Image (cartoon, rainbow, N blue to C red):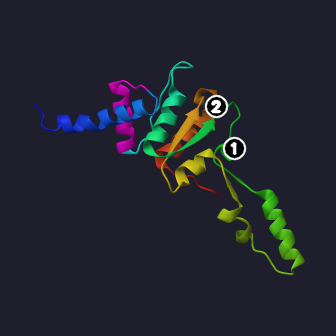
Amino acid sequence: MNPLAPATMAAPRALRQALHEAGYVADESLATACWLARELQRPLLLEGDAGVGKTALAAALARVQGAELVRLQCFEGLDLSQAAYEWNYGRQLMAIRLHEAGGQGLREQDLFGREYLLERPLLRAISSPRPCVLLIDEIDRADEAFEALLLEVLAEYQITVP
């Protein structure tokens, strides 16, 4: 008998109980998979028919962990700017106008700082200072190119913003 087995199984059981208290009934294998994903800091892919509780599980995990739930809804034609980030062009134009009115010069790098970046779900999830659960819904509706990009982002937990 493995002396670590009872202690090893205690944490998944505790997560299963916490999920139950949060309103989600998970079996032992699902609770173990969720616990392992969290412990290993790796994504967890859940697939199944509509209505089986995938979204409810993400919401319950977020509640149990005291984390923010960030949702990315996939659709055909979804691209990086819609999923990860976008520049706040209106705010950038306003800065240009204000600097012109004040007779000051403006460098290009002044316009592409973090304060001009609009975070979309992917960037919000990986740059959040607090824990979050990223729910990527309907991934099968996204294009193959986006799926490849998504796998890269999830493997490295980083996005390059040019």
> Which quadrant is home to the N terminus?
top left
Q: CA distance from mark 2 to mark 1?
A: 12 Å
Please tell me whether residue 27 belongs to the stretch shown in magenta: yes
Q: Residue 82: which numbered mark, if any?
A: 1
Residue 105 placed where, x, y %?
A: 81, 79
Give me the residue at 30% from left, 33% from top.
Answer: 13
Label 2 SS: loop
Q: Nearer the viewer, residue 149 or 88?
A: 88
Name which residue type carries label 2.
Answer: Ala
Name which residue type carries label 1.
Answer: Gln
Q: Residues within 10 Å of mark 1 (few under 14, many from 20)?
A: some
In the displayed structure, does residue 161 sit left or right of residue 87? left
Give me the residue at 87% from left, 70% from top.
Answer: 97
Give me the residue at 70% from left, 70% from top.
Answer: 109
Q: Residue 111: which numbered mark, if any?
A: none
Q: Is residue 97 above or below residue 66?
A: below
Label 2 belongs to which residue?
A: 142
N-terminal of the pair, mark 2 or mark 1, is 1
- Which region of the structure is painted magenta? 25-39
Extreme residue in the bottom direction:
103
Q: Residues within 10 Å of mark 2 (few under 14, many from 20)?
A: some
Q: Is residue 81 above or below residue 107?
A: above
